[in-house]
Image (tube, helix red, strand yellow):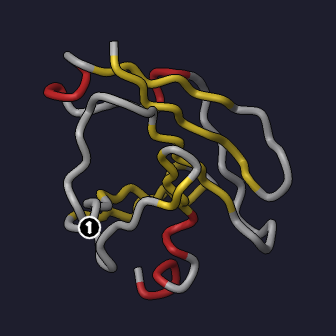
């Protein structure tokens, strides 16, 4: 995890066009192998609690060096915790633009 710390876990979170800060270290993480792919899973808690109502969250994953391929097979690849899923929905945007590989938009129902 120390290697991805310097890259901010390949993740940017925005709300209302402003960067949302998260804690420096994940509370959970796991690295596994699936065939020829390394799979990194982690939980990044936000530095400050955010209300679920209001502006949507924009979560983008990327690798600024184009070394890591971010691939999401479909909307079910990413999921929200049950408490959030009751109030919000996740929309996956697999369009690769610039160095961003994919985006997840979390909006209230």
Q: Nearer the viewer, residue 21 or 2?
A: 21
Name the outermost residue toward the left: 83
Residue 51 lies, in percent from the top left, at 23, 39
Above or below, 64 relative to 105: below
Q: Residue at x 80, y 42 (%)?
A: 96
Q: Residue 62's image quarter?
A: bottom right
Name the outermost residue toward the right: 98
Q: Badge 1: few (under 14), some or many (20 or more) residues near its Cα, within 10 Å?
A: few
Q: Residue 55's image quarter?
A: top left
Judge from the rendering whether residue 25 lies leftward or rightward of residue 86; answer left or right.
right
Quarter of the image where the N terminus is located: bottom left
- Residue, disc 1: 47
Residue 40 lies, in percent from the top left, at 45, 60
Q: Secondary structure at mark 1?
A: loop
Name the outermost residue toward the top: 109
Q: Residue at x 85, y 54 (%)?
A: 98
Q: Residue 53's image quarter?
A: top left
Above or below, 84 relative to 102: above
Above or below, 35 relative to 77: below
Q: Tag count in the figure?
A: 1
Residue 60 lies, in percent from the top left, at 59, 49
Residue 23 lies, in percent from the top left, at 29, 73
Q: Nearer the viewer, residue 98 or 4?
A: 98
Q: Residue at x 51, y 44 (%)?
A: 16
Q: Residue at x 47, y 46 (%)?
A: 15
Q: Nearer the viewer, residue 25 or 21?
A: 21
Quarter of the image where the C terminus is located: top left
């Amino acid at each position: 995890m120390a290697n991805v710390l310097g890259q901010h876990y390949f993740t940017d979170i925005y709300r209302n066009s402003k960067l949302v800060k998260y804690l420096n270290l994940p509370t959970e993480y796991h690295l596994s192998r699936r065939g020829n792919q390394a799979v990194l899973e982690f939980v990044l808690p936000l530095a400050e609690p955010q209300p679920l109502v209001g502006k949507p969250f924009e979560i983008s994953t990327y690798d600024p060096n184009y070394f890591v391929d971010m691939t999401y097979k479909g909307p079910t690849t990413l999921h929200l915790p049950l408490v959030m899923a009751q109030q919000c929905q996740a929309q996956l945007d697999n369009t690769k633009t610039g160095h961003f590989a994919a985006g997840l938009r979390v909006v209230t129902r």
